[in-house]
Amino acid sequence: MTETTAVPEKITLDGLERKWRQVWAERGTYAFDRSAPRSRVFSIDTPPPTVSGSLHVGHVFSYTHADAIARYRRMTGREVFYPIGWDDNGLPTERRVQNYYGVQCDPSLPYDPGFTPPDTPPSRPLPISRRNFVELCQTLTAVDEQAYEDLWRQLGLSVDWSLQYTTIGEASRTVSQRAFLNNLARGEAYLADAPTLWDVSFRTAVAQAELEDRERQGAYHRLVFGLPGGGSAHVETTRPELLPACVALVAHPDDERYRPLFGTTATTPVFGVEVPIKAHPLAQPDKGTGIAMICTFGDLTDVIWWRELDLPTRPVMGRDGRLLPSPPAGVDPEIYAQLAGKTVFSAKETMIGLLRSAGALDGEPRPTTQQVKFYEKGDKPLEIVTTRQWYIRNGGRDAALRSALLDRGREMSWSPGFMRARYENWVDGLAGDWIISRQRFFGVPFPVWYPLDAAGEPDYTAPITPDALPVDPSSDTPPGYREDQRGRPGGFIGDPDVMDTWATSSLTPEIAGRWGLDDDLFARVFPMDLRPQAHEIIRTWLFATVLRAHQEFGSLPWHTALLSGWILDPDRKKMSKSKGNVVTPMALLEEFGSDAVRYWAVSGRPGTDTAFDTGQMKVGRRLAIKILNATKFVLRFDLEEGAADLTAGEVTEPLDRAVLAGLAAVVADATKHFEGYDYARALERTEAFFWTFCDDYLELVKERAYGDPDSPATRSAHAALAVTLRTLLRLFAPMLPFVTEEAWSWWQPGSVHRAAWPSPDEFAPALDPAAPAGLLTLAGTVLGLVRKAKSEARQSMRTEVARLTVRGPDPEVRAFHLVSPDVRAAGVVREVIAEVAGGELAADVTLQS
């Protein structure tokens, strides 16, 4: 918009979002100029929200923070690369599709090109082919993404909507597969059979970063193991159903009770399997009886013991959460048959009965509360099963890589700085490499096939890679093969798994910058300047992105990480969809207005948990209305004509110079805070000055501003008003984009969001280093005393004051003389007397009788 618009008769916030989002879209206000050199570009690695339901107010909170920074940087003359993506692959999307349509994926079924989902979800899930299931995922995510876009536009995010991407789109698949193949070629990605954390509901592997500890009630059972010579060892366990998986007993090497047993064997109760007794420092002498059974596998400590003590495996747990139908080697099949195929709960009850019958259960179970590992999105405890999975080296088993990643953390700027410790704690605590494969359907496929030998067995050590990307090995044919060779001896099979969603999301800088697809663009935006995100995903998104950039480019993916805190409900608990205490934002935006909700959001400082507070939104709404009213009031002084040309050089009066001196300090502080990513302090400083401007300065100067336009004093007032208003609108613009754009349009050309960020230098011509400090505050204080006297006398503010006597220290009295004419006019005072006296500044007010 290049022309100004008329000041409306009635001030309202209603309809501003609809009006300005349309104008911004038509004018390309936030379009990225890709011809700008890298030195002028400010690039943002915007979080792609998970498209698996509705957004909540926590999203509004953190995304508003990033938007305020983007708007500020744009006003400082940077070309802001601000894309938006949608994270639409992975388990959350699949679960939403299953529930929404009432379907279940069955990869063995053929594709039905005419399939239409039922209008009403059936009582039992309808099995459909993988391709049909993926198509439903794409259909539903497209609907969800449009709803997300509508909300983000309503909120006023200044992203360039032409830079949208999805994590399942062709560009994302190409970038993800290319990065994986590079990891594979460098030896950073590898395929291995290993104990894997497994979610039995989703039937998929789970990475360390996706774990969540939850309290569960359990019980210790004291089992009696036989020892050579007729003795016994008592072992306490909360998982007696894993007894057939026992491969050893273990105690601490310094535990005097068990030292004589190290190197000997024990016999498992019920099954009579002979197992070795080992020593290991992870055994806890003060836990239970001090000796534990090692099962393959009950928990992560079992995995460590199994690996470091070089023990065999006796797997009993299936991927469906039931005990396997056949016993492990050496276990009596007749006894095991009583456990085969049972759930963990049923198998535990059966095993307890078998132990009692054998006289191998010492006493009754002892209740306990324990921390159990869950997949963060799951509702059943994780099991550990041996599976073939893809891994990426992440420093968990490589001290040199771990050290390099810690160095990357120190190289990065953190806002707030204390968040770096969370990154370092995560890196220091890594227990293994990153498992990136998932046994799901809607995701980025691994771009490899495996040759089949003459017997039809796959050779996993010689994966076949593609000539072009992206590919789907389940439907595409590898180089040198025909489709009719799929699954046949001498032919090939495709890798059936998809990448973990974090394996794609960890490449958002490369995806948004179109790495390998648009090298010119990538060179202008990478490494990016800013990564805004929530602090709880430092261990997943932030760390994984640093890892991939370090491996691929030997650099950081961005220079600064901006971390948001949590939104807390009225009980000071974190808001989350899983807890059911979230607030959906669209109703809030419609009730209070987008600027009001943004005001609440940017009042929360980086990394600080903030309470959900509609009261704060009401404050924001009042501020937005006051900005419009103040603008309209200022423009009453015939400032529209030539107002854009009024400068600080035309300000001559002491009070006017004082307001610009104060404003110069506000601009310096707000700029400093924005440069440090503290948008909350910038807002706080600006807002405090704005209310002083409205409550004091406008009252003090309005009589002079109504004077003869040719008078230097009036001209000074008009210039000060124009410069102050023009500056305040720019200072508020990153936080309150709609109301500032509306007010700006009444008297300034162009968009406030493309206007230059104010500089203290703009006020230099009006600043007098010798002027007393605090003139505006002094004038406002005296005027406040006059108002108070009138109020206490129950008189109108227009009531005339016969005499105003001001008393105080000499410096303040001399300073008061400079602003006395404006105080006299604003307070309707006939006579002013200023006297030097001891003590604090005081005033006697004599009203006209």
Image: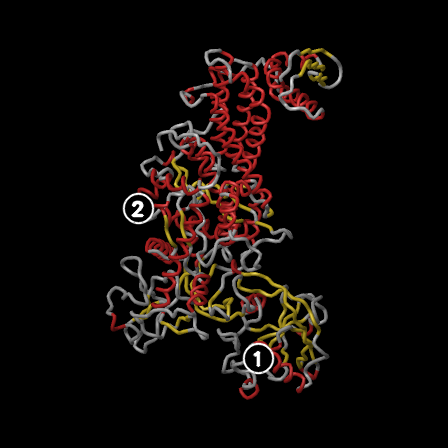
The residue lying toward the viewer, choosing from 331 and 354, is 354
What residue is at 55 percent from the left and 60 percent from the top?
A: 578
- Could you give the CA–CA distance between mark 1 and mark 2, rounded to whole angstroms? 57 Å
The numbered dot on residue 461 is none
Does the rendering let one see residue 421? yes
Q: In the rendered view, tell whether residue 347 sits above or below residue 559.
A: below
Screen quadrant of the N terminus: top left
Vertical arrangement, residue 6 with respect to residue 280, above or below: above
In the image, 50 versus 495, the foreground residue is 50
Percent across and percent down for residue 492 are 30, 71
Quadrant holding the C terminus: top right
Q: Which residue is at a point 69% across and 73% down the rendered structure image?
A: 260
Image point (64%, 79%), residue name: 266
- Secondary structure state at the residue bearing disc 1: helix
- For label 2, the residue is 518
Q: Earlier in the sequence, mark 1 or mark 2?
A: 1
Kindly identify the amino acid type of the residue bearing the numbered disc 1: Pro
| Res. 527 visible in picture | no
Q: Amino acid at mark 2?
A: Asp
The x and y percentages for residue 533 are 50, 47
Say above or below: 481 vs 816. Answer: below
Relative to 754, 827 lies left or right = right
Frontmost residue, 631 versus 601: 631
Residue 188 lies, with reference to residue 287, above or below; the image says above
| Residues at discs 1 and 2 in contact (Cβ within 8 Å) | no
Label 1: few (<14), some (14–19) or many (≥20) C-alpha neighbours in 10 Å: many
Q: Nearer the viewer, mark 1 or mark 2?
A: 2
Residue annotated with mark 1: 244
Tell me the crowding category of disc 2: few under 14, some 14 to 19, or many 20 or more residues within 10 angstroms, Cα based: few
Q: Measuring from the top left, give residue 668's x and y in whole percent.
A: 53, 27
Q: Where residue 475 appears, x then y in whole percent?
A: 30, 67
